[in-house]
């Protein structure tokens, strides 16, 4: 379980007149993510979603507030203890190519967390990497390639396999399908759904796409200007969103098909 208690994150920058100003990326957010639930976080670019993800995964420290993994305060953990926790809580970054070492083969990229966070020998490592590749529909030949030799959808699969390589109980997916065409997006989202059957307890899917959130999640959070403005359990359609900002996001969606109701989602199909 991951818990945030009144967490804020501020950055320093320059204002219009060159003066130093403080920018609030996340403002006093409190939430609890259980490992048996599928969550989604929805918001526009710049709403604070990715900053929240980095805070949740203990990549960046908060300016104020507290983050807990299984009841223990993350930033009070001994580095060795936090390293062990990182095997249980993984993240798939938005920029798939940027998160992989361009000099390492796909096989080595997937195997790296296994080597750093587990005690598997090389035979066990290879068995696990090959099993993950098969699950993610990556061929043996693709495992020997470098990241730049793969398509965007294939790179997303590599990052998912890498995150799953240490058998985590929770994964944060940060805009995991952005920039992909509709067919590939659907394939990746279906793979994420299948991860629950492959031993993943829960996940947080971060997106600007309400349709994808409805397709993947049991619980949905909506974020605006660094704050959670709406929380929903078991949302099933556009009609379940009540906050003015949520309705604005829905109204800004492109038409799905001629004659579609404003309460229907157009993603699934």
Image (spheres, rainbow, N blue to C red):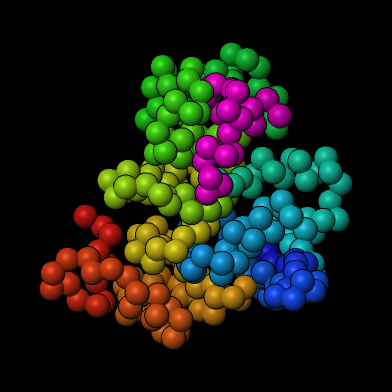
User: In this picture, is 205 found above or below 19?
Assistant: above
Q: Is residue 266 left or right of residue 57?
A: left
Decide whether residue 104 is among the magenta residues.
Answer: yes
Instruction: Locate the N terminus by quadrant.
Output: bottom right
Which residue shows up at 64% across the image and 61% down it? 51
Q: Which residues are magenta?
A: 93-116
Residue 129 at x, y percent in the picture: 52, 24
Q: Please tell me which residue lies in front, 230 or 178.
A: 178
- The answer to whether residue 201 is visible is no
Residue 95 at x, y percent in the picture: 53, 45
Which residue shows up at 60% across the image and 67% down it? 48
Residue 220 at x, y percent in the picture: 47, 69
Which residue shows up at 77% across the image and 71% down it? 18
Which residue shows up at 32% across the image and 70% down it? 253
**Quadrant assignment, res 246:** bottom left
Q: Residue furthest left?
A: 259
Instruction: Locate the C terminus by quadrant.
Output: bottom left
Total labels: the figure holds: 0
Residue 228 at x, y percent in the picture: 57, 75
Q: Is residue 12 left or right of residue 183?
A: right
- The answer to whether residue 179 is visible is yes
Q: Residue furthest front?
A: 17
User: In this picture, is 21 found above or below 110?
Assistant: below
Decide whether residue 78 is among the magenta residues.
Answer: no
Q: Please tell me which residue lies in front, 137 or 234.
A: 137
Q: Is residue 265 left or right of residue 27?
A: left
């Amino acid at each position: 379980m991951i818990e945030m208690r009144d967490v804020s994150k501020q950055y320093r920058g320059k204002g219009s007149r060159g003066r130093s100003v403080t920018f609030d990326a996340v403002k006093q957010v409190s939430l609890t993510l259980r490992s048996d639930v599928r969550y989604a976080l929805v918001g526009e670019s710049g709403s604070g979603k990715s900053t929240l993800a980095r805070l949740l995964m203990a990549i960046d420290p908060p300016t104020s507030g507290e983050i807990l993994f299984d009841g223990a305060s993350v930033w009070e953990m001994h580095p060795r203890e936090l390293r062990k926790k990182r095997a249980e809580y993984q993240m798939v970054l938005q920029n798939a190519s940027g998160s992989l070492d361009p000099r390492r083969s796909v096989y080595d990229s997937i195997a790296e967390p296994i080597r750093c966070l587990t005690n598997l020998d090389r035979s066990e490592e290879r068995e696990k990497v090959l099993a993950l590749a098969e699950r993610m529909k990556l061929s043996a030949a693709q495992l020997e390639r470098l990241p730049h030799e793969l398509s965007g959808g294939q790179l997303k699969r590599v990052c998912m396999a890498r995150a799953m390589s240490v058998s985590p109980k929770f994964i944060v997916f940060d805009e995991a399908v952005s920039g992909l065409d509709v067919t590939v997006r659907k394939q990746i989202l279906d793979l994420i759904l299948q991860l629950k059957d492959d031993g993943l307890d829960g996940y947080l899917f971060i997106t600007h796409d309400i349709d994808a959130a409805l397709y993947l999640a049991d619980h949905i959070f909506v974020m605006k200007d660094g704050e959670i403005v709406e929380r929903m359990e078991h949302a099933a359609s556009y009609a379940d969103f009540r906050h003015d900002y949520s309705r604005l996001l829905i109204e800004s969606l492109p038409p799905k098909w001629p004659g579609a109701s404003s309460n229907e989602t157009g993603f699934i199909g």
